[in-house]
């Protein structure tokens, strides 16, 4: 306690800090409070990211043009997948795997030298679809 004699001692400042050190496991409790503040901050960041993801997913699920385009792609895949009349069904396929594993939509050229994606764009989409796609892109940014 030589500090009281050597320095100017203010009971409301230095005395308060001295009393804090008397508390059982004081350093560990301060570390725990610091960790709690950090966790709460990270949780807020995570929740914000989750909200953004939810907004994006909701927007995609509500998009009529996305359903239309992927419906066309799924229909083409189903026809290619089960072309035998005796099967009388389509087994389906994983569209995500198709899009990741190949560049079929960009490289396959049809009779007019047009890619499948360009054909869907030219033949199947109307001006309103392009507007919806632009709005979708803005929401997803």
Image (cartoon, helix red, strand yellow):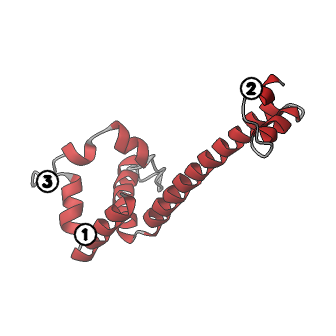
Q: Residues within 10 Å of mark 1 (few under 14, many from 20)?
A: few
**Foreground pick, 50 / 35:** 35
Counting residues from the start of the chain, the first of labels 3 and 1 encountered is 3
* Label 2 close to label 3 by CB (< 8 Å): no
- Which callout, 3 or 1, points to the residue nearer the camera? 1
Q: CA distance from mark 2 to mark 3?
A: 89 Å
Measured in 3D between alpha carbons, the distance from the residue under mark 2 to the one under mark 1, in whole angstroms, is: 78 Å
Question: Which residue is at a point 35% across and 37% down the rendered structure image?
Answer: 101
The residue sitting at 74% across, 41% down in the picture is 33
**2 and 1 marks in contact (CB < 8 Å):** no
Q: Is residue 56 left or right of residue 70?
A: right
Residue at 76% x, 42% y: name it.
Answer: 10
| Above or below: residue 119 compared with residue 40 | below
Instruction: Kindly state the secondary structure of the residue where label 1 is placed.
Output: helix
**Residue named by callout 3:** 114
**CA distance for labels 3 and 1:** 19 Å
Crowding near the residue tagged with mark 3, few <14, some 14–19, many ≥20 C-alpha atoms within 10 Å: some
Query: Mark 1 highlights which residue?
Result: 130
- Residue drawn at x 80%, y 30% is 4
x and y percentages locating residue 63 in the rendered image: 41, 68
From the viewer's perspective, is the residue at label 2 or at label 3 nearer?
Answer: 2
For numbered disc 2, what is the local secondary structure? Answer: helix
Q: Quadrant of the N terminus?
A: top right
- Circle 2 residue: 6
Q: Nearer the viewer, residue 53 or 5?
A: 5
Q: Is residue 14 above or below residue 74?
A: above
Nearer-N-terminus badge (2/1): 2
């Amino acid at each position: 306690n030589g500090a009281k004699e050597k320095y100017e001692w203010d009971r409301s400042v230095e005395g308060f800090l001295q009393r804090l050190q008397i508390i059982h496991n004081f350093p560990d409790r301060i570390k725990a409070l610091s960790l709690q503040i950090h966790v709460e901050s990270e949780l807020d960041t995570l929740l914000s990211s989750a909200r953004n993801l939810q907004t994006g997913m909701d927007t995609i699920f509500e998009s009529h043009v996305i359903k239309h385009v992927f419906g066309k792609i799924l229909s083409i895949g189903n026809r290619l997948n089960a072309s035998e009349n005796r099967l009388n069904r389509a087994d389906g396929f994983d569209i995500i795997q198709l899009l990741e594993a190949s560049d079929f939509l960009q490289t396959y050229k049809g009779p007019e030298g047009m890619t499948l994606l360009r054909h869907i764009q030219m033949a199947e989409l109307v001006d309103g679809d392009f507007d919806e796609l632009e709005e979708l892109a803005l929401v997803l940014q």
